[in-house]
Amino acid sequence: MSGYIEAGYISVFSVLTLYGGSLIIRVRKTEKKLPDLTEEKKD
Amino acid sequence: MSEVNFAAIPQVFSKRAETATKIIGVLALLSLIATVWLGLFVTPPDQFMGNLVRLLYVHPPIAWVMFVAYGVAFLSTLLYLWPRTRDLRFDRLAGASSEVGVIFTGLTLLSGSIWGRPTWGTWWTWDPLLTTTALLFVMYLGYLALRRLPGDPETRAKRSAIGGLVAFIDVPIVYFSVLWWKSLHQAPTVLDPVTGKTYIHGSMAYTLLLGFVAFTLLYVYFVAKRYRLERLKYLYDRVLLDEAIQERKREAADFKAYGADKKSLVPTAFAENGPALGDARFFGTEEESVVGGGEAGR
């Protein structure tokens, strides 16, 4: 396979991993600032 | 956060929605792995493009998600602007979907550029489709910047909604640009909107279809997470605001109770003798002081 295919797949999935990872971390950090707001815990 | 006032948090998160998001995330991951495996190792090379066709399983699904994301954002914006359905949840959904859309627009341009170099002989050309897509990327970046401007949630939502509608004008232009103008980029492969024919078959078609499903699932997962983040921030701001209001109320109550004892508000010497000469703390400068009373009063 040519280097273009690898470059295409690696760049796409790297960006998606970085964005997804940062999103999960940001959600968790914000959740820590607040009490547990899920239905079961609040009841 | 021991002093959090739960009365300020009217909404709670559904446990079912959390579980559904996790399931969608796992399904997205598994289908993406399957797409990559099929795309790189199972499907045959193309008659004309050879192995370069393997980028087909990534590039069109990403572009598809870009359109879906902006479509969802547009509908959410309309629902927010419509007085009967006006709700900040639609504004949050529009913001979340647009952000994911911007990521996928960037990836469309990136993967397209990497594919364009060996097939067209250039990383970039001012082709109608490429140019309008780049414009779309910039316009939605502007929309995201607009969303970050300070303001109360309602004002910010209205402002963003107008920006979102303006940015969406470019979406149909991007889609139809390959049909309206002479473009270097090929017309849609899966389903040609003019002839209604499909130009892909067999394992290549199934892999491409799986790619569409996989990236759509990933989009849903990202939007669910981004929406949750936006809602958490909103609730956190409300908690902070509520705490600030309670604090001001406590201060006001303390001051009221303190002020009931009038003598305690002023120094003892002042209460008994009035202001001393040169005491400008309460009544202005020495020359301006006109308050009488006491030995030094004028």
Image (spheres, coloured by chain):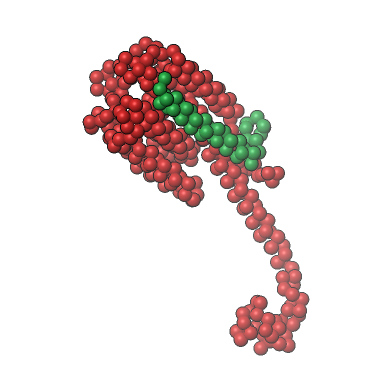
Chain colours: A green, B red
Name the residue at 35% across, 17% down: B50
In the picture, residue B198 is in which quadrant? top left
Q: Is B195 situated above or below B130?
A: above
Q: Quadrant of the C terminus of chain B?
A: bottom right
Question: In the image as oriented, which residue stretches furthest toward the top?
Answer: B202
Q: Residue at x 37, y 11 (%)?
A: B202
Q: Quadrant of residue B167?
A: top left
Q: Say which quadrant the N terminus of chain B sits in.
A: top right
Q: Quadrant of residue B17?
A: top right
Q: Nearer the viewer, residue B22 or B206?
A: B206
Q: As displayed, is residue B26 above or below residue B254?
A: above
From the top left corner, tell me how far across and down residue B257 is, in percent: 72, 62
Vertical side of B143 occupied by B53: above or below: above
Residue B9 seen by the camera: yes
Q: Nearer the viewer, residue B157 or A31?
A: A31
Q: Position of residue B76 (x, y in %)?
A: 42, 35
Residue at 40% x, 26% y: name it.
A4
Q: How many marks?
A: 0
Name the side, left or right, on which B214 lies relative to B228.
Answer: left
The x, y position of residue B137, in whole percent, is 38, 38
Q: Is residue B210 visible?
A: no
Q: Could you tell me which residue is drawn at 45 percent across and 37 percent down?
A: B99
In the picture, measured across the screen, residue B209 lies left or right of residue B281, that is: left
Q: Nearer the viewer, residue B260 or B114?
A: B114
- List x then y, in percent, for residue B153: 49, 46
Residue B119, above or below B200:
below
